[in-house]
Amino acid sequence: MVRAHIVNHTHWDREWYFTSADALVLSEQLFTEVIDELQAHPEANFVLDGQLSILDDYVALYPEKLAEIKDLIATKQLFIGPWFTQTDAFFAHGESILRNAMIGVFDSKKYGEYMKIGYLPDTFGFNAQMPTLLNQAGFDNIIFWRGIHLGEHVQSTYFKWTGLGWATQVYAINMPQGYGTGMLLEPTEAYVDGRLDPAIDFIVKYSRTQEVLIPSGNDQLNIITSFAEKLARINEMGRHSYELSTYQDFIAYVKTLPDLEEYRGEFRSPVLARVHKTIGSSRMNIKLRSAELELKLLTRIEPLLVIAKASGIPISERLLMHTWKKLLEGQAHDSLAGCVSDAVAEDIMHRMKEADELCDSIENTIVKKNCR
């Protein structure tokens, strides 16, 4: 009998074929229901997709709910962060990925503890230096789906991923059937026999472990109500042991496994899931503008702020963070990849225009103050 760690979550595309306005309207209803369900069921927990931007949007609508949200995070019912947005891990500059994590960690302080997990459930492939980047951001693990070829890259779904150059490693946890493996969690024999048990059997075939991770959620999917009750009924039907768990608990288990395989390199294989390789040439205006702004921020604006501070010129780092956020909103896995509608593409380009103007304004202010 295998012990299945069931983790309830939602994956939240902030903009995709729908606009960020559409996502905000949906989140207004869904996130409110999440809060209500968690308060009604103290034994339940929920992962809010690992990005702060969507929570910021919600709290801007409901600032009076901040105390309730902080309480749910403190009692380990609601899990947030660590990213500002669900970063693209292939087309974004490595320093941008680091800034995404740094800003997410910094911003999470206003809510409480963040997940210390390199949680990237839907990114379309990963560069080979992700272990190094994650290590620099303070994470010793990653949970991911796409890009892996089990049986070729590694044999097991749970292994150690080593970066290039530096001897940096992270514990890697692959979700071979995606973040929707246990979605809906229906307490019926048809669901358990037809979906849940076979999913566990598939993972165990590769992992050869006594415990496996089963994420229960999907795109814009709501919290599972009466989770404990449904899980108890499922335990009466299935061949395995199913329990409400957390990503943190499962990572702790993986760290106890002896002789984990080691892998060095990228993940870009479309074997178990699409990685959309043609996105490398889609909406090049977004990719080129993003690269230009990255260089402007990294090689001009950030150094100027350091010089300004050393020269006694007071320019707040908050302005820099605000500028980075404009760029990072367009570097989410779907946004930067170009898997978006025309309306969303216009929004992304407009935010980059605002970021560019902020860069110029910061520079002009420093120059003016230096000339006094």
Image (cartoon, rainbow, N blue to C red):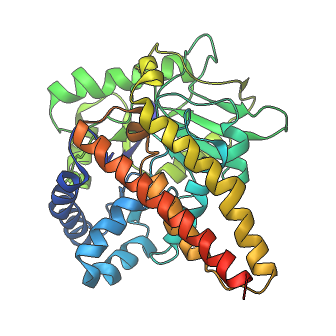
Tell me if I can see residue 9 in this picture: no
The residue at the point 23 percent across, 62 percent down is 31
On screen, residue 192 above or below 87:
above
Q: Quadrant of the C terminus?
A: bottom right
Q: Quadrant of the N terminus?
A: top left
Relative side of 77 to 208, left or right: left
- Determine whether 35 is above or below 236 in the image: below
Residue 130 screen position, x and y as percent: 66, 38
Residue that appears at 69% across and 58% down: 300
User: In this orientation, does residue 64 appear?
Assistant: yes
Asked if residue 75 lies left or right of residue 292, the reply is left
Q: Compared to 268, does 338 lie above or below?
A: below
The image quarter in which residue 150 lies? top right
User: At which x and y percent is residue 198?
Assistant: 33, 20
Tell me if residue 107 comes above or below residue 298 in the rendering.
below
Numbered circles on residues, count: 0
Which residue does the image show at 59% across and 11% down from the upper left? 151
Residue visible at 85% across and 38% down in the picture: 166
- Give the x, y percent position of residue 154: 64, 18
| Residue 168 horizontal/vertical position (percent) | 79, 41
Q: Nearer the viewer, residue 172 or 103?
A: 103
In the picture, measured across the screen, residue 279 lies left or right of residue 308, that is left
Q: Nearer the viewer, residue 136 or 295?
A: 295
Q: Which is more toward the observer, 55 or 47? A: 55
Residue extending furthest toward the front: 371
Which picture quadrant has residue 153? top right
